[in-house]
Image (tube, rainbow, N blue to C red):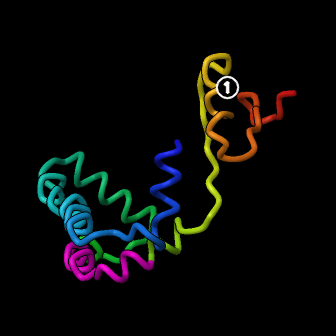
């Protein structure tokens, strides 16, 4: 949790996205599209997403070019807007007796204990 908090707080400040990271993200987002569309289940999944999200008919045709056109500056600006200087909220699920003390020791902020329905536990 501490490492993730440090990484996220560095976005937009002292730890911008690097060109190699952006290239890897582009590849992850686009290179699998062909194989995803090679099965009936893959096609159905994309068509369901397209319908549910009200995407235009040519969305997936244009998608690789749009992703390729994202500049390093735009990616860093978007990342800073999403993650930079925003408070983090952690949802940690586990055996309270085994994890609570370690989580509190991190000093990342207030710890609230809730039950399975989201009600505060006193």
Secondary element under disc 1, as helix, strand or loop, is helix
Instruction: Please tell me which residue lies in front, 6 or 35.
Output: 6
Q: Is residue 109 left or right of residue 9?
A: right
Q: Residue at x 50, y 54 (%)?
A: 6
Q: Is residue 68 left or right of residue 9?
A: left
Q: Position of residue 28 (x, y in %)?
A: 22, 58
Q: Position of residue 120 (x, y in %)?
A: 83, 34
- Identify the image quadrant of the C terminus: top right
Instruction: Please tell me which residue lies in front, 16 or 46.
Output: 16
Q: Which residue is mark 1?
A: 101
Q: Residue at x 53, y 44 (%)?
A: 2
Q: Please tell me in which quadrant of the rendered image residue 69 appears.
A: bottom left
Q: Position of residue 41 (x, y in %)?
A: 24, 45
Q: Is residue 68 magenta?
A: yes
Q: Is residue 28 left or right of residue 80?
A: left
Q: Please tell me in which quadrant of the rendered image residue 23 appears.
A: bottom left
Q: How many marks?
A: 1
Give the overall secondary structure of the magenta segment: helix
- 25 over 45 or under it: above or below: below
The residue stretch that appears in magenta: 61-77
Q: Residue at x 47, y 64 (%)?
A: 10
Q: Residue furthest right?
A: 122
Q: Residue at x 45, y 61 (%)?
A: 52
Instruction: Please tell me which residue lies in front, 51 or 62.
Output: 62
Q: Is residue 67 magenta?
A: yes
Q: Position of residue 24 (x, y in %)?
A: 21, 61
Estimate how packed mark 1 is, as few (under 14), some (14 to 19) or many (20 or more) residues with alpha carbons within 10 Å.
few
- 121 over 42 or under it: above or below: above
């Amino acid at each position: 949790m501490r490492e993730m908090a440090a990484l996220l707080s560095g976005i937009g400040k002292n730890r911008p996205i690097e060109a190699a990271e952006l290239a890897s993200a582009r590849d992850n987002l686009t290179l699998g599209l062909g194989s995803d569309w090679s099965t009936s289940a893959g096609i159905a999944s994309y068509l369901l997403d397209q319908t549910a999200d009200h995407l235009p008919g040519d969305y997936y045709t244009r998608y690789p070019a749009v992703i390729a056109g994202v500049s390093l500056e735009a990616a860093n600006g978007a990342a800073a807007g999403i993650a930079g200087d925003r408070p983090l909220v952690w949802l940690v699920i586990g055996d309270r007796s085994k994890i609570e003390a370690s989580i509190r020791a991190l000093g990342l902020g207030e710890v609230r204990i809730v039950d399975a329905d989201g009600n505060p536990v006193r």
